[in-house]
Image (cartoon, rainbow, N blue to C red):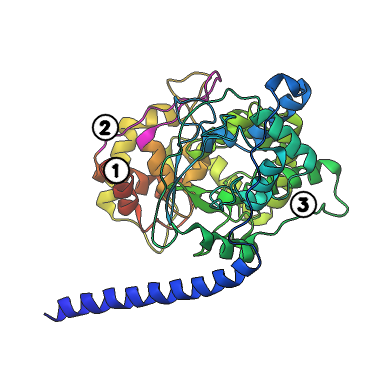
């Protein structure tokens, strides 16, 4: 009886909290409504010029910029028509679907003038005046130059028009009420150009612009607050996206071997570079796009990111030396670092057995793969991340090379390993290949990644 009363009391408190939040939101929205921020005016439908009216060089530049912006990852379903929308994006607040941005006048943006396009990119307002959810990173696109927006508009309006209605979003109450976004914009939308860094070379500042504006790298690689805003004091310090951890791109980089601008540029174009892991997860699509971007843009991004990581200090250099030393021998032969906390011996024994049976033939000095050698595990960044989710995903799902690109290949082990075996393998790899303390949530990460878990 007491448990039931407690449950009722909790539900009542939640209802009161929601009611109070809704009341506060209504009050704020009333003030914003007076300022015209909740219901912006619609922009009249336009007769957009025919594709042949756009300069080819301008369209080509727009195509390269769209690659830097990773636009098709959110606006193109796998196997579906390009830029026709429908891609589900899971967020802590529910699922939002990418929209149709082809020039179809009914279901896409075919009736959008360049003015309407620019307003959507910079202020997050659709042509008809409704507010866009910030899953569309207009808080970054707002910094784009007029010239780049013009090129992107030319590219979008020369795509094949596809008639495809938007899919319904599924958001928690009361976020279905779009005017609430006005409050978020008031707090977090900072319009204006990217400010160049004084005393830095043009390539650095071009990279700064691409990273902070079109590339919106911090959208995944920075942690977020409870309201879904990037934490300004943890810029590029690592974040979470779509069940994966986006590694830190600042001095907190988890990579056992420090990145250089040259290595980063190679990785961003190909997804593969010596002494670093190959691309997987959401980053796979980013690299696929950057492989088609202007190489000068990619090099500028790499230059800027490498500068944020900084020159390796003594601790990072020592970590790199340790990783290389361990990578020079079969992993089972490595003398594991003594720790105050160590996993259960039975778990470690099972993990070692699974590794020998399923992984060692490729990952110990690349046996069986000739010149296409597999990465030695002490060099794999997934083992150094704060959570085991990336490593679990990689083992379950495998890794495929980018379409049309040579690269390492790893088969998926989903169905071949039980949850207990996968948990033991991940636990053992962290213990054997790194000097870091054990992860505390491996079993939960394995359970969460199971195909049976919705």
Q: Which residue is mark 3?
A: 194
In the rendered image, residue 377, in percent from the top left (x then y), is placed at 47, 38
When the figure is inspected, residue 4 is found, relative to residue 36, above or below; the finding is: below
Question: Is 348 on the left or on the right of 335, as rendered?
Answer: left
Classify residue 41 as left or right of residue 444: right
Tag 1 residue: 450
Q: Secondary structure at mark 3?
A: loop
Q: Would you identify the image quadrant in which residue 276 lies? A: top right
Where disc 2 sits, the SS reads: loop
Stretch in magenta: 396-417
Figure quadrant of the N terminus = bottom left
* Residue 293 location (% of width, % of height): 68, 29
Cα–Cα span, label 3 and label 1: 42 Å
Magenta stretch: residue 235 in it? no
User: Residue 312 location, x and y as percent?
Assistant: 69, 51
Q: Which residue is mark 2?
A: 416
Mark 2 or 1, nearer chain start: 2
């Amino acid at each position: 009886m007491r448990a039931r009363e407690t449950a009722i009391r909790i539900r009542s408190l939640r209802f009161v909290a929601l009611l109070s939040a809704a009341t506060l939101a209504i009050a704020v929205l009333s003030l914003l409504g007076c300022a015209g921020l909740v219901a912006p005016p619609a922009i009249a439908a336009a007769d957009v010029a025919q594709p042949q009216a756009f300069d080819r060089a301008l369209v080509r530049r727009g195509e390269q910029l769209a690659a830097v912006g990773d636009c098709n990852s959110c606006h193109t379903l796998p196997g579906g028509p390009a830029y026709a929308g429908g891609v589900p994006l899971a967020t802590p607040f529910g699922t939002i679907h990418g929209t149709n941005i082809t020039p179809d006048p009914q279901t896409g943006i075919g009736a959008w003038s360049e003015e309407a396009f620019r307003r959507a990119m910079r202020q997050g307002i659709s042509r008809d005046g409704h507010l866009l959810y910030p899953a569309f990173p207009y808080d970054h696109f707002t910094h784009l130059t007029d010239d780049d927006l013009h090129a992107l508009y030319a590219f979008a309006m020369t795509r094949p028009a596809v008639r495809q209605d938007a899919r319904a979003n599924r958001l928690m109450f009361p976020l279905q009420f779009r005017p609430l976004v006005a409050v978020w914009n008031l707090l977090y939308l900072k319009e204006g150009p990217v400010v160049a860094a004084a005393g830095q070379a043009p390539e650095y500042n071009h990279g700064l612009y691409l990273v902070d504006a079109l590339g919106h790298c911090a959208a995944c690689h920075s942690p977020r607050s409870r309201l879904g805003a990037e934490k300004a004091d943890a810029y590029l310090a690592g974040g979470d996206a779509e069940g994966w951890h986006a590694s830190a791109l600042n001095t907190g980089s988890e990579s056992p071997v420090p990145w250089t601008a040259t290595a980063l540029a190679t990785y961003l174009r190909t997804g593969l570079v010596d002494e670093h892991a190959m691309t997987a997860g959401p980053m796979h699509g980013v690299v696929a796009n950057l492989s088609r971007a202007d190489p000068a843009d990619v090099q500028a991004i790499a230059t800027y990111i490498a500068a944020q990581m900084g020159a390796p200090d003594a601790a990072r250099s020592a970590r790199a030396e340790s990783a290389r030393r361990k990578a020079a021998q079969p992993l089972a032969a490595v003398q594991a670092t003594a720790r105050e906390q160590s996993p259960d011996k039975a778990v470690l024994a099972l993990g070692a057995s699974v590794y020998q049976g399923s992984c060692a033939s490729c990952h110990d000095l690349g046996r069986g793969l000739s010149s296409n050698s597999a990465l030695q595990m002490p060099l794999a960044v997934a083992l150094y991340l704060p959570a085991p989710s990336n490593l679990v995903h990689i083992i379950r799902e495998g890794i495929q090379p980018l379409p049309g690109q040579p690269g390492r290949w790893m088969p998926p082990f989903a169905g071949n390993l039980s949850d207990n075996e996968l948990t033991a393998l991940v636990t053992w790899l962290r213990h054997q290949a790194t000097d870091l303390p054990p992860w505390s949530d491996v079993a939960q990460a394995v359970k969460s990644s199971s195909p049976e878990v919705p």
